[in-house]
Image (cartoon, helix red, strand yellow):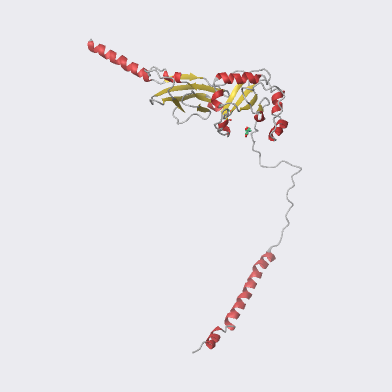
Amino acid sequence: MAAVLIWISLLVGLLAGLGGTEVQQTTLHPLVGRVFVHTLDRENFLHLPELVVAVPATVPITYHAHLQGHPDLPRWLRYAQRSPHQPGFLYGTATPADRGRQVIEVTAYNRDRFDTTRQRLVLLIGDPEGPLLPYQAEFLVRSHDVEEVLPSTPAGRFLTALGGLWEPGELQLLNITSALDRGGRVPLPIEGRKEGVYIKVGSASPFSTCLKMVASPDSQARCAQGQPPLLSCYDTLAPHFRVDWCNVSLVDKSVPEPADEVPTPGDGILEHDPFFCPPTEATAREFLTDALVTLLVPLLVALLLTLLLAYVMCCRREGRLKRDLATSE
Ligand SMILES: *[C@@H]1O[C@H](CO)[C@@H](O)[C@H](O)[C@H]1NC(C)=O
Ligand SMILES: *[C@@H]1O[C@H](CO)[C@@H](O)[C@H](O)[C@H]1NC(C)=O
């Protein structure tokens, strides 16, 4: 009886131990063509059952994320963390090719004690519902770093502020990229200088005249000369978001692009074409004389030269006699 009790307690302990080391798993649902942001918070990692001692909030933490079975993240997903005291972000926009299930493994490192905690993110990437967003605009926000617009509060504020410039309609974030990933430079460490971030927004309602004007060729021409562009409306994004109005790009996908025609192989014979003029008929020509002249003239010249040389060498040699005469005994 006692032996059985010991066995049971051992077994329970073993199972509890196994449960404790199990990697925490979270399921997320990114949408194709819409921006996806996941915050890697210390709370998510440090309040796990296996961490007996609570980790103080000042401990620096870094993260490493990779696609399960691969050394790096999938192409559409990026990782950003400003400093070990701030949260990390996984962000990006899935493309139609990424549809399906992707498993991201995240390891958090406690930089003081070098503990690690692992978490598994199961991404079930699906298609978005709702209307298509054929009107897409991209803005370069110079006053922010990418991490500063990834949390939902500033992102929502950007959309609300942008609503004042666009026709009222549902605006959605499509893509967020750091300007550094698009050829931007790291700013000088001067107060208020930021890396800049590109924010792409989509809507079902057409662009406002104000936006169209900003992106018009006239405006671009002014920008090229270093002048401010034509902004015909009140900049509702200022002062919180400093948008580079010279770098707004509008994409209108409401007109479907003509599908590429599949080339069909023909029979290889040209149809009658009034503009096709075949080369004129070539008349027969005699090439014998040309060939003979080409061959015989050089031959004759060569023969003459040979004869001349032979004559000079054989009949006109005076070297030996001359030498003998000139040399004393
Ligand atoms: C998002 O923006 C980045 C950088 O411009 C680009 O490489 C990527 O293809 C975009 N994603 C989508 C789904 O358009
Ligand atoms: C504006 O964006 C384009 C790419 O879209 C880039 O080549 C250009 O350098 C940007 N201009 C400025 C002033 O950042």
Residue drawn at x 23%, y 11% is 2
Compared to residue 153, the image places residue 256 above or below, namely below
In this rendering, position of residue 234 left or right of residue 91: right
Q: What is the quadrant of residue 242 in the picture?
A: top right
Q: Residue at x 56, y 18 (%)?
A: 153
Q: Residue furthest right?
A: 274
Residue 311 coordinates in the image, percent (x, y): 60, 80
Residue 69 position in % (x across, y down): 44, 29
Query: Can you say whether 211 is above or below 224 in the image?
Result: above
Tell me residue 35's x, y (percent): 56, 23
Do we see residue 94 in this rendering? no
Q: Nearer the viewer, residue 173 or 290?
A: 173
Front residue of 117 and 313: 117
Outermost residue to the top:
1
Looking at the image, the residue that sits furthest to the front is: 191
Q: Nearer the viewer, residue 216 or 298?
A: 216
Residue 298 image position (x, y, % from top left): 64, 69
Q: Quadrant of residue 137?
A: top right
